[in-house]
Amino acid sequence: MLVDRMKFIATKELGRLAKWMRILGFDTEYFQEENHSKLKIVALRDERIILTRNTRLSRPKGIKLVQIKHDLLNEQLLDVSKELELKADKDLMFSRCTICNAVLEPIEKEKIKDKVPEYVFETHNKFIKCPACLRIYWSGTHWGNVEEILKEAGI
Ligand SMILES: [Zn+2]
């Protein structure tokens, strides 16, 4: 499977990891229910790789599952990258909304004048918008110290 085609579904204890998989550009659904059969159905239907910290979740037939062994985010990212030989791809990064997983779209600067703080408008030229939740993103914001975390995670 090509790395950029990999899709994921993270179980409820992995909200932060799900957000980071989105930052890396991966289509990642965050499944917050306890219903394991439903989880497997979604994974199978959408060909998603299950990411879970839950050791009671049996390995389902025909579905790939990555058992996350650590609590710290950088170690969790390492768990995923080791198992799937994942590499951070700069072209894919920051292409999805961290809140709702939708693919972000470029938006003209003039259209967001009233929607971002004035200093941000003055100092940035490129903006992208989530078509689902309408959140506006710009470089260097919302994502925290990405470079540092990825370096710690070794990906
Ligand atoms: Zn969104």
Image (cartoon, rainbow, N blue to C red):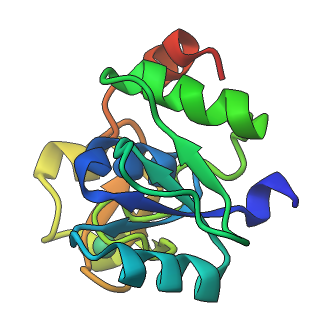
Where, quadrant-wise, is the C terminus in this rendering? top right
Looking at the image, can residue 1 be seen?
yes
Q: Quadrant of residue 12?
A: bottom left
- The location of residue 115, given as percent across then percent down, is 15, 69
Please report the residue visible at 34 percent of the width from the left and 39 percent of the height from the top.
143
Residue 142 in view (yes/no): no
**Residue 128: image location, x then y, percent:** 43, 66
Q: Position of residue 144 (x, y in %)?
A: 31, 30
Quadrant holding the N terminus: bottom right
Residue at left 57%, top 24%? 78
In the displayed structure, 20 sits above or below 1; it is above
- Displayed quadrant of residue 85: top right
Residue appearing at x 35%, y 72% in the figure: 36
* Residue located farthest toward the top when viewing the structure as drawn: 152
Ligand 1 picture quarter: bottom left
Query: How far from the left and from the top, in percent, is residue 151?
Result: 56, 13
